[in-house]
Amino acid sequence: PLRSELDQQLLIYGFVEAYHHQLLWDNRQSQRVYDAFVDVWDCEELWVTLDRLNLNPPNRGIRDRALIDPTDRGFDIELHWDIDTTIGVPPQRVQGIIALNDTRPETGGFQCCPELFRQFETWKVGQPEDRDPLRPAVDRDELPVVRPDLRPGDLLIWNGLLAHGVARNLSESGVRAVQYLSMMPALEEHER
């Protein structure tokens, strides 16, 4: 039995609260991963996050997303921003995933709206003042959502202003598996 509504959402969305398995540490300490974040930040002194896994089996039965009450505002697994998009100068933030297996369109997985990212400043001007700061209301015909194919070991890094989410797994038995991770500059004011 699930202990809470949050536990139910974590189960349905496929979040796995695993942080210290050696595979996760090996990925966090990989030279290839580190070098990619060095390129992103143009900085060699980086902190690494302790993020979780996502195992996204088919969304049916006890994992059917219809079991989660829809909301009009706030976080939405389908498409969201990682930062408050209504503040004047948003913080610079990046997030990443490492694919642990093949991701095909029917197994769901990472999806994003690159055109909204490209046109964000223009798009923002046409939005109501009380728009949701975390969930974009977009016409997907005008601003399409895309899903990149990922292979095991692929590293995907994106800007926090890129609207993104996890598409439903509509397959019969496939599972999408990724490790979330990020790195950020180890600034002098941060304690070591």
Image: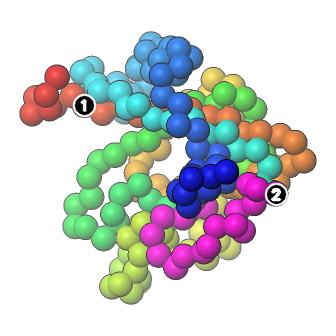
Residue identifier under label 1? 185
Q: Residue 143: x percent and y percent?
A: 59, 69
Q: Nearer the viewer, residue 35 or 48?
A: 48
Q: Could you tell me what secondary structure mostly forms the magenta stretch?
A: loop
Residue identifier under label 2? 61
Q: Residue 130: x percent and y percent?
A: 35, 84
Q: CA distance from mark 1 to mark 2?
A: 42 Å
Q: Which residues are magenta?
A: 61-79
Q: Residue 164: x percent and y percent?
A: 54, 55
User: What crowding class fits label 1: few (fewer than 14 Cα within 10 Å), some (14-19), or many (20 or more)?
Assistant: some
Q: Residue 148: x percent and y percent?
A: 67, 44
Q: In which quarter of the view is residue 190 placed?
A: top left
Residue type indicated by callout 2: Gly
Ranked by sequence position, the earlier of labels 1 and 2 is 2
Residue at the image point whose x is 53% and y is 31% from the top: 18
Q: Nearer the viewer, residue 112 or 66?
A: 66
Q: Which quadrant: the C terminus?
A: top left
Confirm whether residue 111 shows in the render.
no
Residue at the image point whose x is 47% and y is 55% from the top: 162
Q: In which quarter of the view is residue 133 placed?
A: bottom left
Residue at the image point whose x is 25% and y is 31% from the top: 185
| Outermost right residue | 172
On screen, residue 23 above or below 141: above
Q: Nearer the viewer, residue 168 or 3?
A: 3
On screen, residue 43 above or below 142: above
Residue type indicated by callout 1: Pro
| Outermost left residue | 189
* SS label for mark 2: helix
Give the left or right position of residue 146, taking residue 42 as reference.
right
Quick check: is 54 in the magenta stretch? no
Give the left or right position of residue 74, taking residue 174 as reference.
left
Confirm whether residue 78 shows in the render.
yes
